[in-house]
Image (spheres, helix red, strand yellow):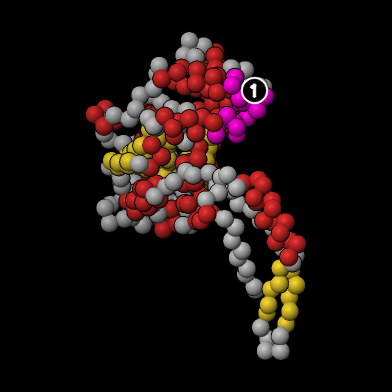
Amino acid sequence: MAGDVGDGYARKGTTNPSEQHEGTIQHPLKDSAESSSGGQFAPLLIALVGLPARGKTAIAHSLARYLCWIGHSAKVFSVSDYRRKWTEQYDNHDFFCPNNEEAMELRKKCALEAMRDASNWIMSQHGEVAIIDGTNSTRSRRQCLYNKFHEQMNCAVLFVESIIDDENILAKNMEETRRNSPDYKEMSREKALNDFQLRIKHYLNLFETISYKHEGHYSCIKIKNAGDDISAHRLIGHLQSRILYFLSSYQPTPKTMYFSRVSVCFLYYRFGSICLMLKAKFLAGISTSVNKTHSSYLTRSQYFRAVVHVI
């Protein structure tokens, strides 16, 4: 049903099946109803673009949560997860060397597998927004994505490129990757950071930023330095505009949330009101724990707040 998929992108083509191009795959949600522009609404493929340590994974998952929150089915397909599935253990940066033909072939296989699963999810599970989290670092790779999802499946395709040239932001991202990536869980901090820097250098040898001169027919959003600057090109439809709105205010700041089951005592007064009494020892314990553990990381405005919901 067109209304279920609705990202505001009109399908190209005609309503006569005999006039469809050979190899075109019809989405299972396709309906005979057409948009005012003469096409039909299509699912959306979002492909992240950028060097390692540019915050692509954080953007992908934040965007997926936002899209689900506003009522669209969205799913992230991480190329790195496919790579880890096919490799027993990450050894070092040589895996990403352009001269390592065996590894390059495996990386290509992983990218194609992510594309296959994304297309299957769209087709068989009526997915609306598939997000491929990977570097997608060359024009040829992006052309492959575009051909697969737009030319063959009539999906809308949106590239989101993250560009970071601020050394402070880059250093923070590298440290975050070093702490959280399964690739580096067995490495020392110094060895992991050095290996990650060499991995980035391998990508730099081949990386091609999205060029409007050569790729001007793509829908594209470019984010620079984690949101300091953002530009958009050829966005089509309501959903892509919503994505731009979200990314314009996106701030990838690490946050920690604490949940506690509070020791409470409810006192019921004769007028029916409820008084919530928190034990002094519990409050003292929370205060001591926060002061000892995180006082150096918290500003005054970030300190503990107690929010009580009585249902």
Give how far across and how far down residue 2 sits, in percent.
40, 55
Quadrant placement of the C terminus: bottom right
Which quadrant of the structure image shows residue 306?
A: bottom right
Q: Position of residue 72 (x, y in %)?
A: 47, 53
User: Residue tagged by mark 1?
Assistant: 187
Q: Is residue 217 above or below residue 8?
A: above
Name the quarter where the N terminus is drawn: bottom left
Q: Residue at x 72, y 82 (%)?
A: 268
User: Residue at left 39%, top 50%?
Assistant: 249
Q: Is residue 267 visible to the viewer in this orientation of the structure?
A: yes
Q: Residue at x 35, y 41 (%)?
A: 228
Q: Which residues are magenta?
A: 176-191
In the image, residue 255 lies at what x, y percent? Answer: 55, 47
Q: Amino acid at mark 1?
A: Met
Nearest to the observer: residue 148 or residue 253: 253
Q: Who's the residue at 53% across and 44% down the image?
A: 254
Residue 36 within the segment the image draws in magenta:
no
Asked if residue 271 lies left or right of residue 178, the reply is right
Report whether residue 24 is seen.
Answer: no
